[in-house]
Image (cartoon, helix red, strand yellow):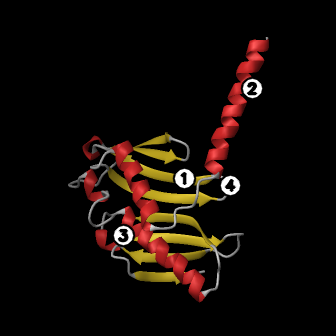
Amino acid sequence: MNSIKQIVSVAVIALVLMSCDSLSSKQPENVSDFKKIEAELSSEFGNDAYYTDLSVMYIKGLGVTTSATVTKEPTSLKMGQWENSQGWKQSSEISLELPEGTEAKDFMFQLKDKINLSNLGDCVEKSISHLKSEKKIEKPALHLASVSFPDNGDYSKADYLIMLKPENGGTTFTYTYSLDGELLNFRY
């Protein structure tokens, strides 16, 4: 009986230590932070993976969660919804149905030239700087940074979406940027 209590105690201590580690995770706020996230994605799914959805969320006290709908082989018509907060875990599997005469990769993007997380990180930096200078918010906190890719696969309609909040909560400030970093919309 004592050995069971010891095992349970060790497991509880390990869980507490793991949660403390996630509490110390800092929010991604610059190009370098987003390059690290892109490297994690490449490490997990490969440099040639195809995505239909990709987002990075920061929750104070919990840390960073990266979410991706991804496949290594688009012709399989199977994608996985994956999340990473303390290790990658698949939350669901998705089967694609395509319009006749199209290929799955027509509706997907890769993290390469046109879309990459360095550009997303640059847009986050611009948004934080804007809130500090224009709205006098001392510590804007990232809520969400994502690649918005249209269901029809039209790259010209793809953009980066950034949502920031004051560190202690309040109004959400939403920025939309083109893939080349031009501000398209700012609202709150």
Q: Amino acid at mark 4?
A: Gly
Query: Closer to us: mark 1 or mark 3?
Result: 1
Q: Position of residue 40 (x, y in %)?
A: 41, 49
Quarter of the image for the N terminus: give it. top right
Residue depicted at 62% across the width and 46% down the height: 21
The residue indicated by pointer 3 is 158
Quarter of the image for the C terminus: give it. bottom right
Q: Amino acid at mark 1?
A: Thr
Q: Residues within 10 Å of mark 1 (few under 14, many from 20)?
A: some
Q: CA distance from mark 2 to mark 1?
A: 28 Å
Dot placed on the residue nearer the N-terminal end, 2 or 1:
2
Q: Residues within 10 Å of mark 2 (few under 14, many from 20)?
A: few
Circles 2 and 4 in contact, beta carbons < 8 Å: no
Per the image, label 1 sits on a secondary structure element best described as: strand
Per the image, label 3 sits on a secondary structure element best described as: loop
Q: CA distance from mark 1 to mark 4?
A: 12 Å
Q: Amino acid at mark 2?
A: Ser
The residue indicated by pointer 2 is 9
Q: CA distance from mark 4 to mark 3?
A: 31 Å
Q: CA distance from mark 2 to mark 3?
A: 49 Å
The residue indicated by pointer 4 is 61
Q: CA distance from mark 2 to mark 4?
A: 23 Å
